Image (spheres, coloured by chain):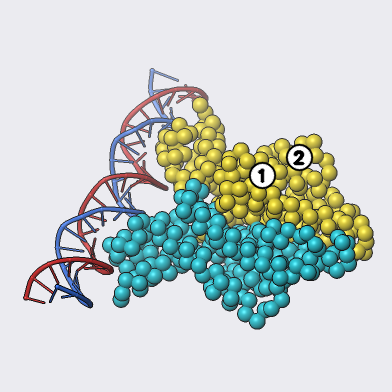
Chain colours: A yellow, B cyan, C red, D blue
Amino acid sequence: MNAADTRSRILMTAMELFWEKGYLSTSVSDILSRSQVHSGSLYHFFPGKQDVLVGVLELYRDGIDEMLLAPNWEGVDDPIERIFALLAGYRTHLIVTDCTYGCPIGSLALEIHEPDPVVRDLMAANFTNWSAAIAGCFDAAADRLPPGTDRRALGEFVLTVMEGAVMQARTYRDIGYFDRNIAVLRDYITTLMAAEKSGNFA
Amino acid sequence: MNAADTRSRILMTAMELFWEKGYLSTSVSDILSRSQVHSGSLYHFFPGKQDVLVGVLELYRDGIDEMLLAPNWEGVDDPIERIFALLAGYRTHLIVTDCTYGCPIGSLALEIHEPDPVVRDLMAANFTNWSAAIAGCFDAAADRLPPGTDRRALGEFVLTVMEGAVMQARTYRDIGYFDRNIAVLRDYITTLMAAEKSGNFA
DNA sequence: TGCTTGGTTGAATGTTCAATCAACTCGGCT
DNA sequence: AGCCGAGTTGATTGAACATTCAACCAAGCA
């Protein structure tokens, strides 16, 4: 096993564990035992536990297209449907985990109350990339929306709804809370597009 | 100092600390030193740290009317404006804490990945009371909404938007993220009421 | 006065944690 | 062959942690 293997096995394992148990509840020993790496090796690549977190957040940031968007958008061309296809991906995650897991970034954001600036910037960058991708969908469908629509705000709003919907579904262990939230969002977006069509805002 | 004093001082202090630092990052020693209580006294009233959390969550649950709703709704009669008055209360919290603090229940919900059923039920009860209060506002304004509107779902949606908006404002340390989210929510609710008025859904 | 009971004290316990480090391996280089 | 340094090993360290407990206190009552 070469160096790249060890480093990336640590990061992959930490990614899993932070997602399953959260950052604070994951001990360095947890990472070591699951990844079959010894403590000296981990501390050879990372100055400390927080630097492992930084590596994981960079992985999420750099992998949003391939890991998140591409899989969910395969075969979906309509930009508005892409938004709901992405949300459906989160729904699937909830289903296969019996509504126990949530958005890894959102969980980290609320779990770490006094984040290091490096960590906070990376969480923010992850949010920005996510909502910018959604805003891009709205841009692509701009002609179906009322003129002057704040599409950046709309992208942030979809992120908000995803995070809140996942939070509730997880707390209640009930997918119904997710579905009702997404249904309301769909009603809003539908209404927006209907308003443009009927010229209410023209 | 009598027994009730000690117990309630522990709970008040724990409430503060869980809000400031989160549950996991708050040690029993933190609670002891700030509340000026000795460990034996704490363990006289609470079997363990988690039971302190249960006590805090019960305090939130039982105090939602007096501690949260009443202060924000004073002098606000219109049910729709009450919704935004409550959200404005969260905005004030963000402002006075330089966008560092968030909804205590939401933070706990994402921080504790494998909650005890007792804890989970209490978090859910807090969410239910919150969104039911909002749903009550929508009920009071039912004649301004399209017939058949799912007002329970709308209450859960407002909770979702609050949680997501607070999460983003806190992560970015920028109130703009909160404001844009609430503006989109207001646009949606306004649109809903305009639709009823113009009879688009009749 | 002496006993009971609810509450208090704070040192001590055992565990878990992140982090350290001296000793080692081994491929690549001169 | 001899050396170098990136990478590995795992026992060890010291701090922080939640929890325990034997001794203590004081109010109320017999």
Q: Is residue B135 left or right of residue A24?
A: right
Camera-nearest residue between A69 and A157: A157
x then y, percent, for residue A155: 74, 55
The amino acid beneath tag 1 is: Tyr
Do the numbered discs 2 and 1 sit on residues whose CB atoms are within 8 Å? no
Asked whether residue B177 is in view, the answer is no
The mark that comes first in sequence, 2 or 1, is 2
Tell me if mark 2 has few (under 14), some (14-19) or many (20+) residues whose alpha carbon lies within 10 angstroms of its own. some
Which residue is nearer to you in this view: B46 or A5?
B46
Q: What residue sits 41% from the left and 38% below the top?
A: A39
Q: Residue at x 53, y 34 (%)?
A: A9
Q: What residue type is disc 2 on?
A: Trp
Can you see residue B133? yes
Say which of B135 and A170 sits in front. Answer: B135
User: Pointer 1: what residue?
Assistant: A90
Could you say where residue A109 lies in the image, as x and y percent from the top left?
57, 55
**Residue picked out by circle 2:** A73
Against B175, is C15 above or below?
Answer: above
